[in-house]
Image: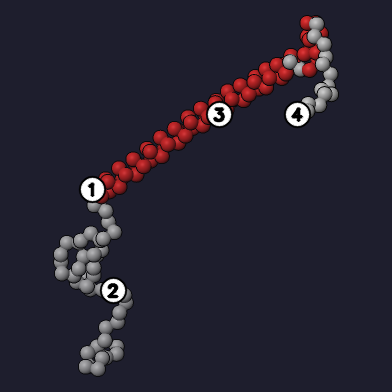
Amino acid sequence: MSTTEMGRPMQRDFGFKKPEDRQFGNQKSTGKAAEPSGKMLSPVKMLVVTLLIGVFGYLYIAHIFYTQELLREVNQLRTTYENARVDHTDTRLTYERMTGPADVYRNAKTLGLTDGGPADRIINRN
């Protein structure tokens, strides 16, 4: 065994500490009770955080359902608009066929009207 400068035998350190030197958690060697570290949440804070997470979760889920309902309504309105547009186009084409030039000339002849021809006269100012 080797000795120190004062002549006492040197103790080997095997990584073990004396019971009075050991510290458990944040407990000091003074014998006081362990104090909670700054990273721990108190039960009240934990309850508040849990409630906030619950409220935000509820709002998120409500938003998702509202958005799906709104999308369903938009798709229904889009389908209604497309059907109305097709009906309008068909009705307009039917009207244009009924009032087209050939039908107008035929109806004019049955009424006894004659074709005026092109406007060959030039209007002069006097």
Mark number, residue 55: none
Residue found at x 33% / y 40% = 55
Other-residue count near label 4 (Cα within 10 Å), few / some / many at <14 / 14–19 / ≥20? few
Disc 1 target residue: 44
Alpha carbon separation for disc pair 1 and 2: 40 Å
Q: Which mark is in front, 1 or 4?
A: 4
For label 4, the SS is loop
Locate residue 23 relative to residue 86 in the image: left or right. Answer: left
Say which amino acid is labelled 2.
Phe
Which callout, 4 or 3, points to the residue nearer the camera? 4
Within-10-Å neighbours for mark 1: few <14, some 14–19, many 20+: few
Look at label 1 and name its amino acid. Val
Give whichever of 53, 69 is nearer the camera: 69
2 and 4 marks in contact (CB < 8 Å) = no
Q: Amino acid at mark 3?
A: Asn
The image shows residue 122, relative to residue 4, as above or below, that is above
Of label 2 and label 4, which has the lower sequence position?
Answer: 2
Q: Position of residue 119 (x, y in %)?
A: 82, 22
The disc placed on residue 75 is 3
Dot 1 or dot 4: first in sequence order is 1
Where 8 sits versus 45, above or below?
below
| Mark nearer the viewer, 1 or 2 | 1
Residue 25, image x, y percentages: 25, 63
- Sequence-first tag of 3 and 1: 1
- Residue 16 is labelled as 2
